[in-house]
Image (tube, rainbow, N blue to C red):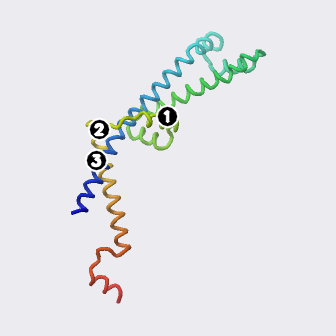
């Protein structure tokens, strides 16, 4: 009887963890988009200057700043270069989060920006979504967790000889 309740508890835990996945993905996507839009706002003036003098090439603007005799311009070149690189990175990150759900999950698991993940996690509010994808994630995680834990416990029990009858043990020791 205890085993049945343990299975139910593991299933419930897996279900609750699984329904968090779509919410976290959505929060991460929104955070990336917000940072991307903020980055674009920060570059707006530099984009205008690059459009006016360098045919819209921000890298040419940065190179011009770096080559300047003015120490203030050379100092600003590093800041502008960072803004340009950050905007490019955020654009790529945003594009990765526009793909199908499995692509988003793979990106989050393998290539997402650690700083943005940590930021998303620290602001994340646990929620139980009743959207179809959240229910699917919940069921899959619940079944997987219950199956893995029960398989692991059965394997450990087999290795330790728990649950074997006396006749089976005698037969193997002859």
Q: Residue at 28% of width from left, 47% of height from top?
A: 139
How far across and how far down the image is residue 103, in percent?
Answer: 42, 39
Nearer the viewer's eye, disc 3 or disc 2?
Answer: 2
Badge 1 or badge 3: first in the primary sequence: 1
Against 56, residue 150 (above or below) is below
How far across and how far down the image is residue 13, in percent?
Answer: 31, 49
**How many other residues sit within 10 Å of disc 3, few (<14), some (14-19) or many (≥20)?**
many
- In the rendered structure, find residue 116 and report the number of the disc placed on it: 1
Q: Is residue 83 left or right of residue 73?
A: left
**How many other residues sit within 10 Å of disc 2, few (<14), some (14-19) or many (≥20)?**
some
Q: Residue at 30% of width from left, 50% of height from top?
A: 142
Q: Which residue is mark 2?
A: 128
Q: Is residue 19 left or right of residue 95?
A: left
Q: Which residue is mark 3?
A: 139
How far across and how far down the image is residue 18, in percent?
Answer: 33, 45
Q: Secondary structure at mark 2?
A: loop
Q: Residue at 29% of width from left, 77% of height from top?
A: 164
Foreground of the two, 102 or 126: 126
Q: Secondary structure at mark 3?
A: helix
Q: CA distance from mark 2 to mark 1?
A: 23 Å
Against 119, residue 74 (above or below) is above
Q: Secondary structure at mark 1?
A: helix
Q: Is residue 139 left or right of residue 21?
A: left
Give the image quarter of residue 153: bottom left
Q: CA distance from mark 3 to mark 2?
A: 13 Å
- In the rendered structure, find residue 172 and report the number of the disc placed on it: none
Give the image quarter of residue 172: bottom left
Q: Quadrant of the C terminus?
A: bottom left
Badge 3 or badge 2: first in the primary sequence: 2
């Amino acid at each position: 009887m205890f085993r049945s309740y343990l299975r139910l508890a593991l299933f419930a835990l897996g279900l609750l963890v699984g329904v968090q996945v779509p919410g976290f993905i959505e929060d991460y996507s929104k955070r990336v988009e917000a940072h991307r839009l903020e980055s674009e706002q920060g570059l707006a003036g530099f984009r205008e200057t690059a459009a006016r003098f360098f045919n819209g090439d921000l890298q040419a603007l940065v190179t011009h700043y770096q080559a300047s005799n003015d120490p203030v311009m050379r100092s600003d070149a590093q800041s502008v270069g960072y803004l340009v690189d950050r905007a490019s990175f955020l654009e790529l990150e945003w594009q990765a989060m526009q793909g199908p759900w499995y692509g988003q999950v793979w990106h989050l698991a393998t290539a997402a920006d650690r700083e943005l993940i940590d930021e998303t996690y620290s602001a994340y509010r646990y929620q139980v979504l009743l959207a179809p994808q959240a229910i699917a994630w919940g069921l899959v995680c619940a079944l997987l967790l219950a199956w893995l834990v029960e398989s692991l416990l059965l394997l450990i029990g087999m290795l330790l000889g728990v649950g074997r009858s006396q006749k089976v043990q005698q037969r193997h020791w002859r």
